[in-house]
Amino acid sequence: LFTGKFVAFDLASSDVTTINEAGDFTATYYVHYSGETPKERFSIEYEVIPGDGLEEGRDYEVENSGRKLNFLPGVFTLPIRIHWMPNDIDPSKDNSVIIRLVSGPEDIILGMPGPDMVNKEIKLIKYKN
């Protein structure tokens, strides 16, 4: 029985999500904290890594300010919001965006406990109609 603390993307069935190139919408990707109720605020930093076929400002915009999630006492889930913009893509390129949890307090595991660190990142793939 694991009794430690961790943060991970709250994903129902897959760590890969697809987005139609014609889509014009805001999607929310949740990061969940699991553990005892924190007594003080803690932060989790994340990075957003586009493939060579996508560009922030042209294909998508991260709506969160900065690249940090600040968990307050009693808060267990926080959103990362991305606005997807309609734009033609080149199917020969890497049309993905990876959002990866990269740092936090030493006593909080990034991703699900275990050697695979499942749900430490999510891959978003934009596809052509």
Image: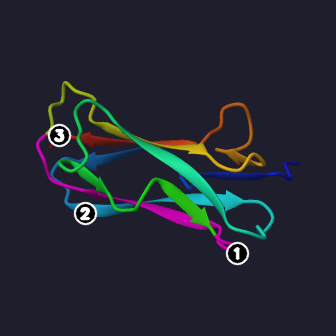
Q: Are marks 2 and 3 in contact (CB under 8 Å)?
A: no
Mark 1 or 2: the one toward you: 1
Residue at mark 3 = 128
* Callout 3: SS: loop
Quadrant of residue 62 within the rendered picture: bottom left
Residue 54 in the image: state x and y as whole percent: 23, 38
The amino acid type found where label 3 is placed reads Lys
Residue at mark 1 = 74
Count of numbered badges drawn on the protein = 3
Q: Residue furthest top?
A: 92
Q: Sequence-wise, which precedes: disc 1 or disc 2?
A: 2
User: How dense is the environment of label 1, judged by Cα within 10 Å: few (below 14), some, or many (20 and up)?
Assistant: few
Mark 3 or 1: the one toward you: 1
The amino acid type found where label 1 is placed reads Gly
Above or below: residue 3 compared with residue 127: below
* Callout 2: SS: strand
Q: CA distance from mark 2 to mark 3?
A: 16 Å
The amino acid type found where label 2 is placed reads Phe
Who is closer to the viewer here, 44 or 21? 44
Q: Residue at x 61, y 59 (%)?
A: 32
Left or right of 74 on screen, residue 50: left
Res 119 visible: no
Asked if the stretch drawn in magenta spans residue 39, the answer is no
